[in-house]
Image (cartoon, coloured by chain):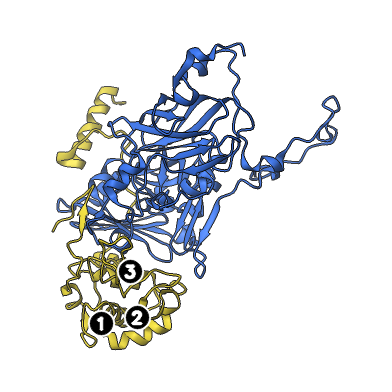
Amino acid sequence: MALPLDRFIAAGGGLLHRRVLLRRGLVLACALPASRAALAQTDTDSAALPDWMQTPGAPFSGYGQPSPHEAGTVRRIGANRLVDGNGVSWTPLEELEGLITPSGLHFERHHNGVPRIDPARHRLLIHGLVKQPLAFGVDDLLRYPMRSRMLFIECGGNSNAGWHAEPIQRPAGSFHGLVSCSEWTGVPVALLLREAGVDPAAAWVIAEGADAIAMNVSLPLAKLMDDALVALFQNGERVRPENGYPMRLIVPGWEGVLNVKWLRRLQLSDRPVMARNETAKYTELMPDGKARQFTFVMQPKSLITSPSHGQRLDRPDVYEIRGLAWSGRGRVQKVEVSADGGRSWAEAALEAPVLPCCLTRFRAAWRWDGRPALLQSRVSDETGAVQPARRALLAERGSNGYFHYNAIVTWAVDKDGAVTHAYA
Amino acid sequence: MPMPERSRLAAATTLAALLFGGCAQPEPWPAAPQRGHAVSRADAQRWDRNVFPDGSGLPPGRGTAVEGAPLFRQKCARCHGPGGRGATAEELAGATQPLTSKTPDKTIGSYWPYATTIFDFTRRAMPMDAPASLSDDEVYALTAYLLFANGVIGEREVMDARSLPAVRMPNRDGFIGIDAKPPR
């Protein structure tokens, strides 16, 4: 190897300084995805023209689809046995790159299915403590000034298997994939509320969706006036049905359930409604019997997507570690990675753009010597908040909180290069 | 006569100040085109299904646990189990393990802070195969049944717009606001 890698060692277990990623001559290996066997290269005569160069290609299509060879990259579904519209589908994070989640792979959490909404009959009503109740049709809102923001949305229940006593053995996305990232475009809620005239007594807004449970939650008015959107577009096209078509509330950095899909009503009030999904659910029971309520802000979190569960390192080599980090409190400031279970850390390189309340991609170089290793990542955000170790989170919250699990994730690499989930 | 750039800006600022009064923040976006359609308060109320802890939003009607028990067997027990003990859907009654145990039971009786939430959620969402199909009397009866099954009220106590918000739930003070504190 041309590059003197010893000079770049930054932490135990062979982690290299992020400067090495900028050096000429560095050749990085990457962990093999679990699906690699099915996609093994077949021997070809590389000099011969492939048949797709000797026949005309497929004609144009009205709406493009992924290659049929990528048909395995799909959301993984976990639904109720008797109510098939109640459950989740996870984004396969370990199979994706970059920041943006393709709209068709954005995670889903539905309480009773995806409503089939006729946009011509859908209205958004703003009422309660306002001077004049107002209704807006989709065509009305399309004429309003809009803003675009790249934002993650994370379900409050994401990663909840982390509370289990034993580490769950599942691909990264099937464990942590209730987070996705899109460019959301829509009308600032403040414009609509001001048009209706906010009563000074208003302090809360109860948002309601047009699905089969008419899902309702309460939000502080200040957040809606600050940076909330009624999103009509996702990744440039109109919001997909399973993400709230024709309109969805977007509250940057806040718990997924508050980003109410199929938004039909905003009622201004002086107090919260105390809905089922802000009392019985989406609250976190603590060991002393009290429960945390109105935990809106998604706290800093990161995970390594490669190497991760089910992937394999086929020989000792210099590997690229790839991962995602985010915080509902603002921008990612720093991501550190460890190969020795958190005893020592090296700073990872953050890939631009690094945006507030948006997924951030990080990369690091790791020289694996073939011995067992424990890979971790730890994010700090611009407010100084740091992702906690699992034992610190459990010491504070116990293990019956269910929601808001954001502890450091550990992947164990064994001497054969197999990767499993571990607690460390 | 075309208005000079600076005057136009000044006029827009004055207009914004007039429109937004004391909170005339500089808008980072153009003004709204004001396309909202006025809705009367009476019409807005017909959309409104929110029921607050103080009972506002509760409709006329009434029901008891005696009336609710057969309804529960018929419409709810398939998912929530006999007596609401839990099945494919969550347990609603019959907590044996306290909230401080290693395996706590989070039922309506042990966990839910407000009785009005039962009415609000049942009316809007239940049963899952026919949401919003229950009459208001049926929702009152099922609410009464679930409160009775949790030992919170008596079997013949009538639940209506007056009595339901007066029910004090055992875990009423069990919650701590983290990112917002609701008024007490």
The secondary structure type at the circle numbered 3 is helix
The secondary structure type at the circle numbered 1 is loop
The numbered mark at residue B135 is 2
Front in this rendered view, residue A128 or A257: A257
Shade representing chain A: blue
Q: Are marks 1 and 2 in contact (CB under 8 Å)?
A: yes
Sequence-earlier tag: 3 or 1: 1
The secondary structure type at the circle numbered 2 is loop
Residue A351 seen anywhere in this rendered image of the structure = no
The numbered mark at residue A421 is none
The numbered mark at residue B121 is 3
Give the labeled residue for mark 1.
B61
Q: Is residue B171 left or right of residue A387?
A: left
x and y percent of residue B141 in the render?
A: 29, 82
x and y percent of residue B131 in the render?
A: 42, 72
Give the amino acid at mark 3: Phe
x and y percent of residue A299 in the render?
A: 33, 41
